[in-house]
Image: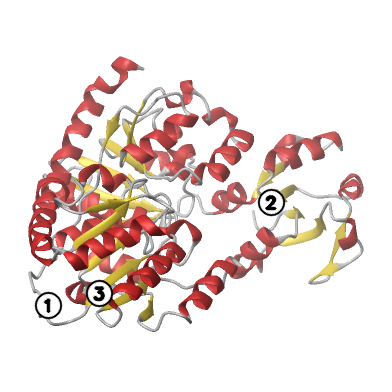
Amino acid sequence: MCGEKLVLFGIGQRYKDIREKYASFFQKLNVIAYLDNNEQLWGNCLDGVPVMSPLSVQTLTYDKIVLMTAYVKDIKEQLAGLGVSSDRIVSWDEFYCADKHGVFLEYGEKFIPDNQKPKLLLISIKLEYNGGTFAAVYAAAALMMQGYDVTVAASEGNSEFIQEAVKNHIRIVIIPSIPFLQEEEKAWIGQFDLVIVNVFQMIRCACSVSQYKPVIWWIHEPGDGYTDYYSVTRDNYPEYDNAAAMRKINIVAVSSVAQKNFNDYYRDRIKEILPFGIPDKCCHKRKAIHEKTVFAIVGSVIPVKAQLIFMDAALMLNEDIEGNVEFWIIGNRGNSSYEEEVLKKAEGISNITFMGVLTQKQMQEKYEEMDVVVCSSMEETMSMTVMEGMMHEKICITTDTTGIADYIEDEVNGLVCQAGNAQSLYQKMKWVTDNPVKCDGIRKNARSTYEQFFTLEKFGQRFQEVIRSTMEGKYREDT
């Protein structure tokens, strides 16, 4: 495939990102021309290869045109108008996956098809340090506790993340051709009794696999996630964006928030909630009571996490009890304009600390020092940070637009504030400092809530019921 004569369409930011990420693969490609709709680029060269007008395609001799853009549908229509046959046009994702068909990189214990345990395959997006991936790996661990043989598969993965998963006895298989499955992949997937597909972006995989295997599709996405995912799916792969394609899939959501987001686009398809669980890592250590109260927010510095709201509330609290509190912001700081705004505001808050990205071990150590875990997000379908806070017996404050808020009774096992309202968050933070005795009860109740809903054992039991209903086809009764 790499020996084919290729024309690449589009040399914008997506092309640059792909070129950087797949640099070694690019070196093998026989690119004879670039096409782009930006006429200012025509006549230039990239690595000695000319950049041309799309009209020039009629003068070229090539095997395939590879689309280096997210606007696949529009460019296909444009090329069709220039006389290009559809079978000679392919998206970058399809092209790359086609070259990787039949590649399986296994990590951990070897898969034995004929063992006596029910065999489950969990397919996820890139394995890295984010909430959706952790939920998938925790699901594997929870299901293994229930007696299943579980394999986690993804198109790629962070090496350190994979090593950590393997140390926890999770079997990982990297299959670069996901989600564009062909016969080699389908035959391999055929060895499993049931397939769990994680997150909305894997819609193509969920619909494809459901044609020959029972499939559970587990949805986690916030509302803004559909802005891009949904439109790209609808425009580029319309065969998957309809009720018929999803008819055989048992679709569940991690929370009521994720359920609503999906159902807004897909006509009330999700009927069941499947919240995840996390391992119990609580050390039950308590800080000395004379120390400062630490309020911590965890997550990348991005608008949806609303660090600015947290900081506005911190400024208000400082006016009341200056010197008795600290504020931590933990997570990737990035280099966006929002991050710059956050840093600028921090200049006026002397008792705020940025800690950057922490390892899992470092985070566990920091939880011991925190008093209050704050989730100020504008929207979050669950909140692993709040869940971990409850597990560690911390006071947790979350907004009313998070999935975890469904499990919190205000001033009983946590506190709930209004999303986007710094005054509301400040009032909850002030309540914590004003009510130390009541906070002791909230900590105990938070831990009880974790034990009732979010342990790996409870998670596995819930998942087992969903698996049973999927295998029996019960979820189809209302579709």
Residue 190 in sight from this viewpoint: no
Q: CA distance from mark 2 to mark 3?
A: 46 Å
Across and down, in percent, residue 459 comes to: 17, 45
The picture quadrant where one finds residue 75 is top right
Across and down, in percent, residue 122 comes to: 31, 46
Q: Amino acid at mark 1?
A: Lys
Badge 3 crowding class, 10 Å Cα cut-off, few under 14, some 14 to 19, many 20 or more, is some
The picture quadrant where one finds residue 393 is bottom left
Would you say the residues marked 2 and 3 are in contact, meaning their CB atoms lie under 8 Å apart?
Answer: no
Is 195 or 212 nearer to us in this picture? 195
Across and down, in percent, residue 267 comes to: 45, 23
Foreground disc of the pair 1, 2: 1
Badge 2 crowding class, 10 Å Cα cut-off, few under 14, some 14 to 19, many 20 or more, is some
Which label number is shown at residue 287? 1
Would you say the residues marked 3 and 1 are in contact, meaning their CB atoms lie under 8 Å apart?
Answer: no
Which label number is shown at residue 294? 3
- At horizontal 49% and vertical 40% (from top left) the residue drawn is 182
- Quarter holding the C terminus is top left
Would you say the residues marked 1 and 2 are in contact, meaning their CB atoms lie under 8 Å apart?
Answer: no
Q: Amino acid at mark 2?
A: Thr
Position above or below: 371 against 467: below
Which label number is shown at residue 69? 2
- At horizontal 10% and vertical 80% (from top left) the residue drawn is 288
